[in-house]
């Protein structure tokens, strides 16, 4: 530990999970303990599959509009707890850690600078008012800090239906629930031919990102990828 760190210790020099000194927001030991999604998973929605199929039954029987879903971590302890505290208890202390993980996810899985437009999945205005922030947008702050001038736009898409308790509903119901749930605030020509990246915190059924991808594609987007921090399994 350098002299400066001894005199002016900051949280940047302590692992946010175990509290031990670390060169980053998370130490290598804690990072290695985070649960990853298994190798054997659906190439579209990333749900673990036990047989050798490339895609799961749900994806085989649905129209998937997004091109790629990037997701590395399992929705499991401690990340799920951190995200929960962040979203529902307003504990924003961990947003930088989640942001770092998202950034690493993006840096390893996609060429983030190739995208013409990056959209954090919007919240309904009532939920935004209640929570005070959009978690996907907040998590993207770290990426904003690392790469300047990223084409992040949190105004171009709005959520006009407050579809609550989505996690418990079945995929079919969810797709139904989400019909017309999102709306563009721009003209089709503004997104026509663009390579778009959607960012979300958790993917459960994939219905939300699929619904947004359908809307963006029907308005002329060339490709729509999604990056989610964690996946429920
Ligand atoms: Zn640690
Ligand atoms: Zn699938």
Image (spheres, rainbow, N blue to C red):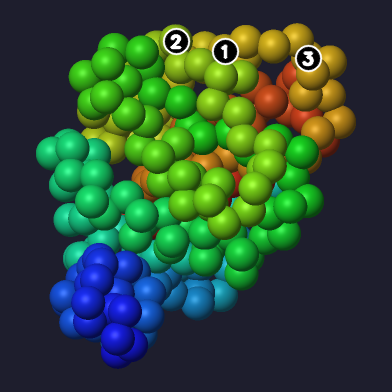
Which quadrant holds the N terminus? bottom left
Residue 75 vs 219, above or below: the answer is: below
Helix, strand or loop at label 2? It is loop
State the residue in front, 187 or 219.
187
Q: Residue furthest left?
A: 89
**Residue 34 in view here:** no
- Looking at the rendered structure, which numbered label has been put on residue 188? 3
Which quadrant holds the C terminus? bottom left
Q: Tell me residue 49's x, y (percent).
A: 45, 67
State the residue in front, 214 or 160.
160
**Circles 1 and 2: CB atoms closer than 8 Å:** yes
Q: Is mark 3 within 8 Å of ligand 2?
A: no
**Circles 1 and 3: CB atoms closer than 8 Å:** no
Identify the residue shown where x is 79% and y is 18%. 190
Residue 223 vs 142, above or below: the answer is: above
Exactly how many numbered labels are in the figure? Answer: 3
**Residue 8 in view here:** yes
Q: Tell me residue 83's x, y (percent).
A: 25, 50
Identify the residue shown where x is 18% and y is 37%. 90
Residue of label 2 = 160
Q: Is mark 1 within 8 Å of ligand 2?
A: no
């Amino acid at each position: 530990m350098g002299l400066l760190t001894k005199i002016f210790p900051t949280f940047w020099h302590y692992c946010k999970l175990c509290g031990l000194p670390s060169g980053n927001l998370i130490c290598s030991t804690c990072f290695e303990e985070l649960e990853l999604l298994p190798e054997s998973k659906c190439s579209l929605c990333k749900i673990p599959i036990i047989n050798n199929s490339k895609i799961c039954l749900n994806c085989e029987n649905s129209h998937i509009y997004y091109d790629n879903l990037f997701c590395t971590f399992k929705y499991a302890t401690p990340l799920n707890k951190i995200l929960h505290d962040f979203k529902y208890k307003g504990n924003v202390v961990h947003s930088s850690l989640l942001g770092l993980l998202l950034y690493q996810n993006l840096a390893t899985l996609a060429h983030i600078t190739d995208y013409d437009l990056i959209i954090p999945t919007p919240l309904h205005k009532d939920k935004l008012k209640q929570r005070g922030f959009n978690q996907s947008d907040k998590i993207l702050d770290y990426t904003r800090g690392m790469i300047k001038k990223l084409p992040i736009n949190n105004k171009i898409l709005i959520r006009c239906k407050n579809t609550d308790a989505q996690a418990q509903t079945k995929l079919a119901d969810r797709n139904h629930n989400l019909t017309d749930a999102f709306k563009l605030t721009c003209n089709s020509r503004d997104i026509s031919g663009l390579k778009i990246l959607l960012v979300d915190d958790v993917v459960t059924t994939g219905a939300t990102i699929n619904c947004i991808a359908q809307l963006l594609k029907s308005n002329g987007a060339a490709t729509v990828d999604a990056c989610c921090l964690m996946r429920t399994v």
